[in-house]
Amino acid sequence: MAKYFDVHPASPQPRTISTVADSLRSGALIAYPTDSCFALGCRLDNHDGLERIRSIRRLDERHHFTLMCVDFAQLGQFVRLDNNVFRAVKAATPGSYTFILPATKEVPRRLMHPKKKTVGVRIPDHTVTRALLTELGEPLLSSTLLLPGEDEPMTQGWEIKERLDHLLDAVVDSGDCGTEPTTVIDFSSGAAEIVRRGAGDPARFE
């Protein structure tokens, strides 16, 4: 049964955030809010959590997982950016964008695209997410909480708990965070390719 945490959207309760971070360190898989929609998350070294995300979403090995980072310094540990890409990504973060970039050796091989050796990264513009990432001290392995056969993610924490209670360890709820996923930009070739148009304005990359 998933624990349910009701978190204030503007002033997250430190004790609650600490409890959720501790559960992640202990191997939990959580549903949590972001600046685009709810996501599934666990630690990078959580093999079981990764497989649980794959199972819940029915993902194949070509799916790009996202590393949810708290700031640009953390993001830079896990992906390689040349000067032009660095400037473009930095100007758009924090925000509702996911960037696909060449992974560094800090990224576990199982999280990379099997052929391209790339990984998705993003820095969310969401108070609760950033508080959790700060407390955890490392990125979250993340994937949009979009269930198979459904067109839009769930928007209510109570609904997520009700439907996925037996599949998750915790649900963090700070209110409706929308249904539109991030805009995805692939920089793996050095030039911006818009893979998905979403919550972030894609115009700056066109």
Image: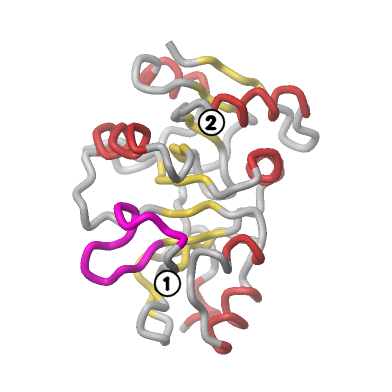
In 3D space, how far apart are the residues under numbered discs 1 and 2 (Cα atoms)? 25 Å
Q: Dot 2 corresponds to which residue?
A: 24
- The span shown in magenta is 106-119
SS for dot 2 = helix
**Residue at the image position 44 percent from the left and 24 percent from the top:** 160
**Residue at the image position 34 percent from the left and 54 percent from the top:** 111
| First in residue order: circle 1 vs circle 2 | 2
- Name the amino acid type tagged 1: Leu
155 and 86: which is toward the camera? 86
Asked if marks 1 and 2 touch (Cβ < 8 Å), the reply is no
Does 130 appear above or below 75? above
The quadrant the N terminus occupies is: top left
Mark 1 Cα-neighbour bin, 10 Å: few <14, some 14–19, many ≥20: many
Residue 74 vs residue 104: left or right?
Answer: right
Q: Is 117 inside the magenta-drawn segment?
A: yes
Residue 98 vs residue 132: left or right?
Answer: left
Q: Position of residue 84 (x, y in %)?
A: 55, 89
Which of labels 1 and 2 is toward the front?
Answer: 2
- Name the amino acid type tagged 2: Leu
